[in-house]
Amino acid sequence: MMAKLKNPIYVTQPDLPPLAEFTELLKQIWDTKILTNNGQFHQQFEKELADYLGVKHISLFTNGTLALITALQALRITGEVITTPFSFVATTHSLWWNNIKPVFADIEGDYFNLDPEKVEAAITPQTTAIMPVHVYGNPCNLERFQQIADTYGLKLIYDAAHAFGVKINGNSVLNYGDLSILSFHATKVFNTIEGGAIISPDEKTKKRIDYLKNFGFADETTVIAPGINAKMNELQSAYGLLQLKYVDDCIAKRNGIASVYREELKSINGISFIDDIEGVDHSYSYFPILVDTSSYGRTRDDLYEDLKRHNIFGRRYFYPLISHFPTYRGLSSSRKDNLPVAEKVAEQVICLPIYPQLENIEILKICEVIQSK
Ligand code: T4K
């Protein structure tokens, strides 16, 4: 048996800005004593982030889940929303928290994103919106979703939690649909410890979202809606500003790791992965592989356990499917025969470790464990 790695390797590790740089900004916060509520760092971070991402209007949030919940509130979505079972559970939970019925449609087999044709077939008179996810940061079929939304008069909200910095032909994926949300959780390509954002197409929508994330206050004495408290604070905004300086380097390193994985894994029977898409700037947030038991000779879970024995902790994102959880399994759209592609992919996928500090020798070790059956 191969030697086990001395230190555990997790699916990811957050990138942190230099502590000395952060301390400098903390001193400023200590001086002004402005800790939250749209302070100087919050305003600056929103501006610089919008510039970096190539979007016009961005509202910072405490996390991606509250951004999703607020996006649905902002557009007054009700009734049924068609979404994917192959995502992190927060995508569907955001519907539940808004008293909206989730309707699951199947995914396509190339990038594991919601299949537009399956969405179209699931539309009912109660459907008010579609909520696709750019899974692993690979863009959904943006044109087709817009076409369906326009034809049926539906809103389109993208869960872009994995799609920080992703562009198609130079244009951010965040510029599509009615709203997009981001997550800046510690495990994401770009993190503010916890954090998130909503990208709006125009100033008036951003304004409404900003009211909603601040209890609904439009001014000192006017409350326009039952808003929530979902504001990002000054410490996280300052941290985010620093992160922006290093994120390009971080994405470049992730790209390098993905290339090594692809080179090392390409000739292993039964292991497949997603290639880069032409015209897309990727951010390499995850490196999923699929294990085909019959040609690989063992199951995904055998490999997952074997990696763990070697101190390598990949993650089976997204297994189990959201449609399997007790809250959702009773829905008629959760039936396995309604979601055959998602069911299959959830049984085959492992996300391998990918983060800037991952060393070449560690990547090679991971590939060696996958290679040796
Ligand atoms: N929509 C989608 C499509 C999402 O993927 C997510 C979040 C959301 C919406 C909601 O956004 P947020 O509300 O979270 O902003 C993680 C994250 O908690 C979650 O943010 C993320 N998706 C999901 C895919 O993954 P876990 O339970 O797998 O994380 P955890 O704590 O097991 O972390 C994985 C590994 O990362 C650990 O084994 C070690 C390492 N790690 C983790 C943390 C938190 C660190 O090294 N340092 C850390 O601080 O959910």
Image (cartoon, rainbow, N blue to C red):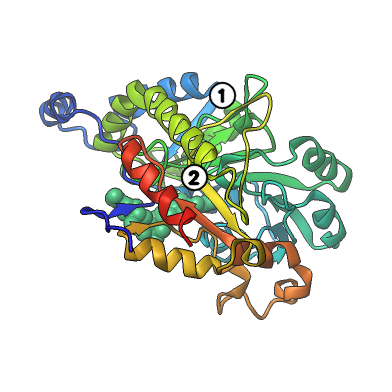
Q: How many marks?
A: 2
Residue depicted at x 40% and y 29%: 253
Look at discs 2 and 1 and give the one toward the viewer: 2
| Residue type marked 1 | Val
Pick the front one: 10 or 337: 10
What residue did someone put label 1 on? 55
Q: CA distance from mark 2 to mark 1?
A: 23 Å
Q: Secondary structure at mark 2?
A: loop
| Residue type marked 2 | Tyr
Residue 232 in the image: state x and y as whole percent: 35, 40
Image position of 269 with respect to 242: above or below = below
Which quadrant of the view contains residue 297? bottom right
Image position of 107 with respect to 142: above or below = below
Image position of 44 with respect to 330: above or below = above
* Marker disc for residue 212: none
Which quadrant of the view contains residue 140? top right
Residue 151 in the image: state x and y as whole percent: 89, 43
Residue 313 in the image: state x and y as whole percent: 36, 58
Q: Is residue 225 visible?
A: no
Decide: few, some or many residues near mark 1? Use Cα within 10 Å; few <14, some 14-19, many ≥20. some
Q: Secondary structure at mark 1?
A: loop
Residue 195 in the image: state x and y as whole percent: 38, 43
* Marker disc for residue 286: 2
Q: Is residue 351 visible?
A: yes
The quadrant of the picture occupied by the N terminus is bottom left
Residue depicted at x 56% and y 45%: 136
Horizontally, residue 56 falls left or right of residue 25, namely right
> For disc 1, does the CB lie below 8 Å from ligand 1?
no
Residue depicted at x 24% and y 36%: 235
